[in-house]
Image (tube, grey):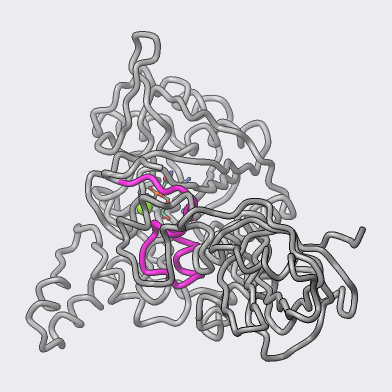
């Protein structure tokens, strides 16, 4: 028996005879030569079947393999700088091919397909090289997230998905019937983490969150993954330092460990290499000024209209894109108007119309990847806000209690995994960053 190896480890087996277990990604036939592009989940390697090197029946069995047929292939690893594939530069000189199943006609062919078609076949689309690269990078991002937080004194806490109350506004709640009571799918684990910091100081939750987003955009899913760190004895300035170090670690890890995937995506990595702290910080007030200036300077009437903004408005994606074009690194927008943000944010000292919030916008128009803030630590201020937002006080009793039993200044943030993946991979639409995305009008497959 030859050893079974995975393609990502192929360089370590140069000159050896090995077996790969995988699927036929593509093939080219040239008379006595068959070039089989075999993928095994960790990469793609060219396997060369030469008629005179294999028994007749092996050559014929290989010839019958269709796209996405499953197979085991044995051969000798050779270096060839021209060999295609991922990581590339190696090929297999085949001595044996054992078909596992000859696939029926595969729906996804090298020709162009529409996105809705591909989404209907998402269960197979994830095998395509681009999707594969994005989802491998996603997994690395998720590991880098845990690695940095665990290494910096944060404790992972599981927060509930079934919740009685809203954290991020009542307009995007998914309601469910909880044995006759109203309950909702969690929009965020933050409120529970504000309890968890009272027990553990620095915590994070990491899991799926749910928002009934009723509009179709390239940045919104209805189910997305969010990591939410929360820190006791931390103000907004201290929070931003944590955020920039955290984001930088994520980017550097991907650059180091997923170079082949970034290359397969054609991502400009020189832009990513610049993601070293500090990241620029501008105030919301300054951002509004910059947008007005841009609107005044542009000759394009459509752009002028899109960039229009009044102090107090939330930013739309044209605003965010225009702002981030002014910076090479992600930019913090600090101190949003209280009216556009969630109920729990600490007022700016001396300016109650502004809150101690900060969003982090990714460069190149990928939009907000982090929303964060200092939280209200005073009981009566928080109670007033709950009333102002017309939230049912009885559901927030436990949350108010946290301000009665040793309240402290505290802050936290949420980073959206899919938006971060979209930015790092340079993908236009967020739907490709989750293996099985959930969106308005899409819950299949
Ligand atoms: O800004 P958001 O709504 O903040 C919160 O949920 C806070 N409770 C976080 C906290 O302070 N603990 O969401 C945080 C991030 C956004 O910056 C964005 O990256 C992502 O979550 N996000 C979405 N991603 C995909 N689809 C959606 N519908 C998203 N909504 C938010
Ligand atoms: Mg936000």
User: Residue 401, image x and y in percent?
Assistant: 49, 23
Number of numbered discs overlaid on the protein picture: 0
Foreground: 250 or 360? 250
User: Residue 424, image x and y in percent?
Assistant: 51, 70
Q: Which residue occupies 40% across, 67% down?
A: 361
Q: Going by the image, does 121 lie left or right of 68? A: left
**Residue 349 appears in view:** no
Q: Which residue occupies 92% across, 58% down?
A: 1
Compared with residue 428, is residue 147 higher up or lower down, i.e. above or below?
Answer: above
- Is-magenta flag for residue 109? no
Q: Going by the image, does 78 lie left or right of 271? A: right
Q: Going by the image, does 312 lie left or right of 326? A: left
Q: Going by the image, does 26 lie left or right of 79? A: left
Name the residue at the left extreme.
301
Q: Which residue occupies 74% across, 81% down?
A: 90
Compared with residue 326, is residue 179 higher up or lower down, i.e. above or below?
Answer: above
Q: Which residue occupies 45% across, 73% down?
A: 426
Compared with residue 30, is residue 429 higher up or lower down, i.e. above or below?
Answer: above
User: Residue 148, image x and y in percent?
Assistant: 68, 57
Quadrant location, the C terminus: top left
Residue 282 figure quarter = bottom left
Foreground: 175 or 407? 175
User: Residue 241, image x and y in percent?
Assistant: 57, 64
**Residue 77 appears in view:** yes
Name the residue at the top extreme.
180
Foreground: 145 or 223? 223
- Is-magenta flag for residue 437? yes
Range covered by the magenta-colored residues: 418-439
């Amino acid at each position: 028996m030859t050893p079974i190896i995975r393609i990502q480890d192929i360089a370590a087996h140069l000159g050896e005879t090995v077996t790969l277990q995988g699927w036929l990604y593509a093939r080219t036939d040239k008379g006595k030569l068959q070039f089989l592009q075999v993928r095994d989940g960790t990469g793609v390697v060219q396997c060369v079947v030469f008629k005179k090197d294999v028994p007749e029946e092996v050559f014929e069995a290989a010839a019958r393999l269709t796209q996405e047929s499953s197979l085991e292939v044995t051969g000798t690893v050779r270096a060839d700088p021209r060999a295609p594939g991922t990581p590339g530069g190696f090929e297999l000189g085949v001595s044996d091919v054992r078909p596992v199943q000859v696939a029926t006609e595969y729906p996804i062919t090298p020709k162009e397909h529409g996105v809705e078609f591909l989404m209907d076949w998402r269960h197979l689309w994830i095998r395509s090289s681009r999707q594969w690269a994005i989802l491998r990078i996603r997994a690395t991002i998720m590991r880098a997230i845990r690695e940095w937080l665990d290494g910096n004194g944060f404790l992972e806490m599981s927060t509930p998905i079934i919740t009685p109350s809203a954290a991020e506004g009542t307009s995007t709640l998914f309601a469910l019937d909880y044995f006759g009571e109203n309950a909702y799918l969690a929009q965020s684990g933050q409120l529970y983490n504000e309890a968890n910091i009272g027990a553990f100081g620095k915590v994070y939750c990491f899991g799926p969150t749910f928002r009934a987003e009723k509009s179709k955009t390239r940045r919104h899913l209805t189910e997305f993954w969010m990591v939410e760190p929360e820190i006791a004895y931390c103000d907004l300035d201290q929070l931003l330092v944590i955020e920039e170090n955290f984001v930088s670690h994520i980017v550097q890890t991907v650059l180091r460990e997923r170079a082949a995937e970034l290359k397969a995506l054609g991502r400009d990595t020189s832009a990513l290499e610049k993601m070293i702290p500090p990241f620029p910080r501008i105030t919301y007030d300054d951002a509004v000024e910059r947008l007005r200036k841009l609107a005044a300077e542009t000759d394009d009437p459509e752009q002028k209209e899109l960039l229009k903004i009044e102090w107090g408005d939330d930013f739309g994606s044209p605003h965010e894109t225009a702002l981030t074009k002014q910076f090479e690194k992600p930019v913090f927008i600090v101190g949003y108007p209280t009216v556009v943000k969630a109920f729990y944010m600490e007022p700016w000292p001396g300016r109650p119309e502004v809150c101690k919030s900060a969003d982090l916008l990714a460069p190149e128009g990928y939009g907000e990847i982090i929303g964060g803030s200092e939280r209200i630590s005073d009981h009566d201020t928080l109670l007033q806000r709950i009333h102002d937002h017309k939230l049912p006080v009885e559901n927030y009793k436990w949350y108010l209690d946290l301000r009665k039993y040793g309240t402290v200044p505290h802050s936290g943030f949420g980073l959206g995994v899919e938006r971060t993946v979209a930015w790092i991979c340079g993908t236009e639409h967020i739907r490709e960053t989750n293996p099985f995305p959930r969106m308005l009008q899409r819950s299949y497959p």
